[in-house]
Structure formats: C-alpha cells, structure tokens
C-alpha cells in the first residue's frame, strides 16, 4: 500500500517539477506580490499603514489563488486517471484505494503548501513596514493552510465521485458556494437578531441556542475570519474555530472519499457522445439530440459540450435562485449590501457566474478535442479552421444564454440597474472596463485549454486577476481614476481579447500538425 502511494507521490512531484506551467504560476504569484508592494508604497502618503495594505493584498491574493487551485488542481486528482482510463490499471497493479488517494492528493497539497510557505518572508516584510503584527501574519498563514486542507479534502471527494474533470469542478463550485454563502447568511441573521435585541425583544433559550449555532457557522468561513484578523488590534489565538473546523472537515471529506472509492471507481469516464442530459435514457431530464443541424459543429457542441436543452432549464433555475437569494435576504433581513444595494450585488454575482460558465464551456470545447485526439481529423475536413473553431464556440455558448438573459432582466427591471445601464451607454470608461474585465476569462480559457492539461479556467482567472491588479496599479500611479486611464485600460483589455483569438488559431494549427 505505502509503496504504491510513495510511487504515485514521487511521480506527481516529478511531473510538477518538470512542468513549466507550474513554475510560471509561481512566477506569476511572485509578480503579483511585487505589484501589491508597489501599490502599497505608492499609496502610503494618502492612506498610511503601507504594511497593512501590502499584507491585505497578499492575503486576499492568496485566498483567490488557493480557491482557484481547489477548483481545478485539487478536483482533478482522480478524474484525470478516469479520463485516461488508467485507474483500473492501478487497481490491477495492487495499489490500494488508500494508496491511490494518498499518492494523488498529497503531492498536489505539498505543491500548494510550498506556494504559501514561499510567501511567508514577504508577509513578515509587512511587519517592518508598519501596521501589522507578527501574530496577524501567523494567524493568516495558519488560516490559509487550514482552508487548503479543507479544499484538498473536498476536491478529493468530488474527484472520487465524479467521472470527468468538468463534473468535479462543477461539484467544487457548488460546495464552495455553500461554504461561503452559509456563513454570510448566518452573519446577516445575527445582525437581524442583534437589531431585535436592541428593540427590546427578549432573548429566549431557543434564540440563544440558535445564536450560538449561527456564530459557529459564521466563524467557519475563512473570508469572514480574514476580515477579523486584518483589523487593527487583533489579539486572539491563532488556533481559531475556523482553523480547527476546516482541518476537521478536510479529513472527514478525505475519509468519505476513501469509503466511497470502491463504488465510485466503477463509474468510468464517459465518451463525448454520452455527456450531459442528451443520450442517457435514465436521466431525470432527457432530451433527444435529434438529427444534425445544417452546421454540425454547432449542433455537436450545443448538445455534447453545453449540455443541450436540459441544461438550459438547469441554468435558468440556478440564476433565478441566485437572484431570489440575494433579494430575499435584502428584503427579510434588511441586509446592507454596500452602496449599490442588492441590485449591485446581484449584478456582480451574476456577472461572475456568467464569466465562469462561459470560460468552462469554451475550455471544455477545446479540451475534448485534445483529449479525444480528434483535432487533427477535425481540421482535415473541407472547412476553414476559423469556421470550425467559431462554430464550436457558438454551439458551446448556445446553452449559456440564460445567464445573460437573467442579468439583462435584473438590470432593466430595477431603477438602479437602469441607471447603471444608461451610464454605461453614455461612454463611461470605468463601466466598460468592468464589462471587459468579465469578458477576459472566456477569452483566456480556451487558449489555456490548448496549453495546460488541467486548470484552464483557473489559469484564465489568474490572468484576469493579474490584469485587474495592473489596472489598480495604474490608477495608483495616475493618482486617481481618470478618463484617459480608463480609456487606455479598455483599449488594452480589448487588445488582449483580440490577441487571444489570434493565438488560439495559431495554437490549433500547431497542435494539428504534430
């Protein structure tokens, strides 16, 4: 058992050590830290406490980066073996399920730990800059490690249960949504209970029990805990409830993956012709793909990448539920969602979900051709490569339109939404920069899918975060937002989108000739 585990662990470490995208990710993270340092130094005269601002940038950058790792890196540990049909060979070679799980997950967790460990000296640099204590640095580092343990356990469970990388990533998105939304809802309910107490409502024992339970849920989330740690005068213990609970959840989820491995390993990866809600007669929602359309590329990717008609209803339900949750809590709990209120929060969440959905669909359209080794045969058809590629993209995005429709409905049926829309039409460069920022991940993702084996969506959002930090750094250098800067930033992001299209076509031709 342990021999097989160590063999898989050694193999994964060797592959990561020789894989140049891994080193590029480390370099990009170091570059982001440098950008955060420059931003803190350039704004120290206006805001003060440069160490605290630098430390906040590193902390939230690490949180975003680790979350992206969880969505792609941790969630594909077992499913990549299922897609390559090598999981059965491992079991036939005598490697136990525990050996497979340990060998495939510990190496990835170790690589992620190295990223956080390499940044610890930079975090201590924030102490010398002022505004941060060593206790805060230790608390943030331990909180991030505990969150990483939780992500590793959840990713291992999702990868064990799912049969494909995309399914595992979708399960991770659902799990992380619950992880972040439940503590936020608990916090809003606690605010409502506090207002009721101030108004003279007597606290019964049952209310006290509910308050204790909600406080535990609130302390579970690392995002809320980081906000508490980064406040001035923090002096609590670094072994918080968030650290202990996240570590325990990670081990529990890993144990569930071990227990369910025998049953889940029997579910092999399906071929491209049987994905989604199209060809499975036992599916809850079954829609026949029918005869091919005049453009077979659009027909194929609509039914077998986007998911067909069935997933259109699923997407409508997801986006409408997201809107109902935001507006429901704003109405019943009198929640304060910032200066733009519930409409602004709903627009932001919808835009983020739409960008993730589009990036996953476009990346999957390219990944399937690489995985099935059909790209060269596809380009041999008597059609231009441009028509083939963009037909595939059109088919992938046909099932994606419920998100933009719901976002448009929220924007046009609310007063603040219409105001934002009219301001956007009046050529406000800041608004166009926000729109283009959410358009960057769908452009980066298919190009990344042709370069890396896993994590195309994570790479796309990593590049988008880099562009965002570049914009923030530019604003700080310009000493405040200006029309000239926003126009330049919009031009740069538009150029990046065009360059992605050109590089995508060049990369496809290069892969087809190999």
Image (spheres, rainbow, N blue to C red):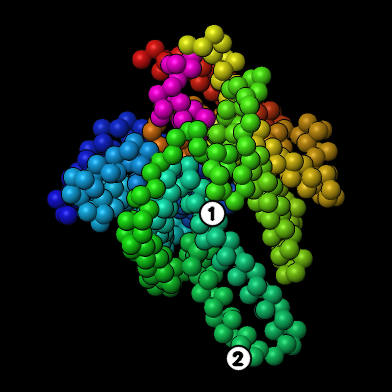
Image coordinates of residue 110 in percent, x first then y, are 28, 50
Which image quarter: residue 411?
Answer: top right
Residue 205's disc is 2
Image coordinates of residue 330 in percent, x first then y, are 74, 63
Between residue 432 and residue 106, name the one nearer to us: 106
* C-alpha gap between disc 1 and disc 2: 34 Å
On the rendered image, what quadrant is the C terminus found in? top left
Residue 115 horizontal side relative to residue 495, left or right: left
Mark sitting earlier along the chain (1/2)? 1
Does 372 lie within the magenta span?
yes
Farthest residue in the top direction? 382
Q: Residue at x 76, y 34 (%)?
A: 428
Q: Residues within 10 Å of mark 2 (few under 14, many from 20)?
A: few
Q: Residue at x 38, y 44 (%)?
A: 268
Between residue 160 and residue 487, name the one nearer to us: 160
Majority secondary structure of magenta residues: helix
Residue 9 horizontal side relative to residue 21, left or right: left
Q: Secondary structure at mark 2?
A: helix
Image coordinates of residue 392 in percent, x first then y, are 58, 25
Does 180 lie within the magenta span?
no
Residue 21 is at least partly visible in this image: yes
Please name the residue that numbered disc 1 is placed on: 174
Which image quarter: residue 408?
Answer: top right
Q: Secondary structure at mark 1?
A: helix
On the rendered image, what quadrant is the N terminus found in? bottom left
- Judged by depth in the image, the label closer to the viewer, 1 or 2, is 1
Segment colored magenta = 364-379
Residue 144's disc is none
Image coordinates of residue 444 in percent, x first then y, are 52, 30
Residue 417 horizontal side relative to residue 11, left or right: right
């Amino acid at each position: 058992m342990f021999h097989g585990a160590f063999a898989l662990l050694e193999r994964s470490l060797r592959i990561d050590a020789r894989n140049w995208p891994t080193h590029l990710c480390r370099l990009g993270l170091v570059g982001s830290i440098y950008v955060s340092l420059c931003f803190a130094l350039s704004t120290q005269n206006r805001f003060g406490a440069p160490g605290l601002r630098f430390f906040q940038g590193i902390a939230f950058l690490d949180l975003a980066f680790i979350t992206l790792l969880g969505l792609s890196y941790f969630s594909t540990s077992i499913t990549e073996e299922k897609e390559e049909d090598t999981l059965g060979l491992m079991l036939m070679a005598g490697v136990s399920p525990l050996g497979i799980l340990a060998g495939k997950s510990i190496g990835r967790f170790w690589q992620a730990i190295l990223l956080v460990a390499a940044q610890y000296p930079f975090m201590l640099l924030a102490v010398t800059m002022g505004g941060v204590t060593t206790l805060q640095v230790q608390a943030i580092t331990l909180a991030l490690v505990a969150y990483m343990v939780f992500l590793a356990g959840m990713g291992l469970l999702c990868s064990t249960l799912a049969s494909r990388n995309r399914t595992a990533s979708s399960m991770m998105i659902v799990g992380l949504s619950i992880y972040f939304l439940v503590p936020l809802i608990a916090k809003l309910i606690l605010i409502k209970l506090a207002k009721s107490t101030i108004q003279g409502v007597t606290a019964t024992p049952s209310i006290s029990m509910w308050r204790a339970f909600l406080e535990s849920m609130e302390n579970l989330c690392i995002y809320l805990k980081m906000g508490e740690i980064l406040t001035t005068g923090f002096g609590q213990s670094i072994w918080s409830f968030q650290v202990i609970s996240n570590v325990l959840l990670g081990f529990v989820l890993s144990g569930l993956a071990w227990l369910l491995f025998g049953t889940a390993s029997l579910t092999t990866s399906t071929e491209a012709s049987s994905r989604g809600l199209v060809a499975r007669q036992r599916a809850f929602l079954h829609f026949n793909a029918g005869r091919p359309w005049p453009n077979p590329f659009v027909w194929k990717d609509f039914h077998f990448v986007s998911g067909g008609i069935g997933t259109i209803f699923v997407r409508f339900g997801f986006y409408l539920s997201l809107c109902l949750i935001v507006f429901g809590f704003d109405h019943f709990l009198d929640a304060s969602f910032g200066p733009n209120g519930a409409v602004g929060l709903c627009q932001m969440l919808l835009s983020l979900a739409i960008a993730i959905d589009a990036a996953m669909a476009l990346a999957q359209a390219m990944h399937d051709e690489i995985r099935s080794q059909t790209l060269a045969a596809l380009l041999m058809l008597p059609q231009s490569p441009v028509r083939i590629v963009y037909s595939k993209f059109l088919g992938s995005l046909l099932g994606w339109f419920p998100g933009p429709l719901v976002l448009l409905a929220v924007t046009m049926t609310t007063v603040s939404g219409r105001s934002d829309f009219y301001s956007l039409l009046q050529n406000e460069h800041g608004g166009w920069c926000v729109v283009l920022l959410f358009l960057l991940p769908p452009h980066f993702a298919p190009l990344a899918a042709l370069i890396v084996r896993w994590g195309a969506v994570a790479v796309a959002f990593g590049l988008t975060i880099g562009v965002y930090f570049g914009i923030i750094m530019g604003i700080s250098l310009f000493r405040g937002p200006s029309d000239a800067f926003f126009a330049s930033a919009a031009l740069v992001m538009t150029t990046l989108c065009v360059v992605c299209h050109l590089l995508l076509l060049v990369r496809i031709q290069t892969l087809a000739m190999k």
